[in-house]
Amino acid sequence: MKAAHQVLQRPTGARRDGPRIPDAPRSIQKGSSLAELLGSEAIECLAQNLKLVHPMFDADLFQRAALKGLASLSILRRGEHLARVLRAHLPSCYEDAVAVLLRSLTPPLTATDDLGLGVFFYLPHVSFVAAYGLDANGNGGRDPFEVSMTAQHELTRRFSAEFSMRTFLIHQPERTLARLLKWTRDADPHVRRLCSEGARPRLPWAQRIPALVRDPRPVLPILEALKDDDDLYVRRSVANHVGDIAKDHPALAFELCERWLAGASEERKWLIRHAVRHPAKKGVKAAMRLRERAQ
């Protein structure tokens, strides 16, 4: 997750009289937890944002339901809990509910560093898409795939859709991978990063993608498209993705890095060194040789 170790930066253009995210600490303080980022202040802010764009939204009733049973939950479980409460209080048609959520968003992030802990505010939004974004029955019988892809494209520009995207890669892998490959050419580095980060087979904190753990080759075209991305933020994700592959298929990961060494720029050499750093530290000779050659 891209914000867990960084500091707060309020999205440019977020106003106190418009949709906003709550203030958050610069880092997790001793004795506190990430779960506190989705506490009463965040729930109040979420309710106000939704009320601004959807006057029929019952903000008081939503807040009471959202706070019920919240205290004992981890941050990921809080995101899922709030998604369920949102489902009960937003329009019953998924497409209409997503339209309300998207209208309530603050402006997109304008940087790829110092994103801050405050962006965890959007965890319930991506949890909502993950939980309900594949169910045609909840969308008047219509396939909700395009609605869900639009939502994740917008949400990842403010937080990250790396968790929700995994649901689509598990249940609809071919069309989801095709969309991610298309997005590797997106102008926004947050979106391009999602193409790699969301498809990592062993993404920390997230459910694994069993098919890609068994065979990561379907995602290799995405990594090829991003290996020389202009933004280090994206290239770092590609390196970590290759590192994930190396845990289950070291020969494939090392072969990929070997091929990428040909004509490699200094930026790509850094990516290769970063990708194989863990097996190199364990003394794996192939990884150590790659790091040495990528100096």
Image (tube, rainbow, N blue to C red):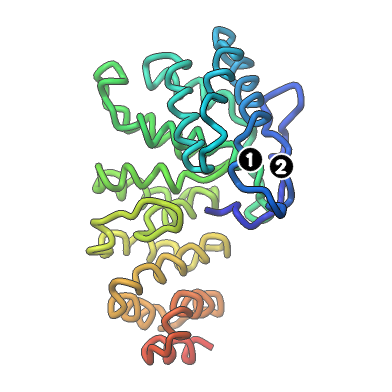
Q: Residues within 10 Å of mark 1 (few under 14, many from 20)?
A: many
Q: CA distance from mark 1 to mark 2?
A: 7 Å
Residue sitting at x 47%, y 23%:
85
Q: Residue 96: give x, y in percent of width and height.
A: 42, 17
- Left or right of 94? Residue 194 is right
Contact (Cβ within 8 Å) of mark 1 with mark 2: yes
- Left or right of 132? Residue 98 is right
User: Is 85 placed above or below 122 here?
Assistant: above
Q: Residue 81: give x, y in percent of width and height.
A: 46, 31
Q: Amino acid at mark 2?
A: Ala
Could you say which is closer to the camera, residue 112 or residue 276? 276
Q: Which residue is mark 2?
A: 24
Residue sitting at x 66%, y 55%:
6
Q: Which residue is mark 1?
A: 37
Looking at the rendered structure, the secondary structure element under dot 2 is loop
Q: Residue 253: give x, y in percent of width and height.
A: 34, 75
Q: Residues within 10 Å of mark 2 (few under 14, many from 20)?
A: many
Find residue 284 and name its label.
none
Quarter-wise, where is residue 213 in the image? bottom left
Q: Residue 68: give x, y in percent of width and height.
A: 53, 24
The quarter of the picture where the C terminus appears is bottom right
User: Is 165 placed above or below 244 here?
Assistant: above
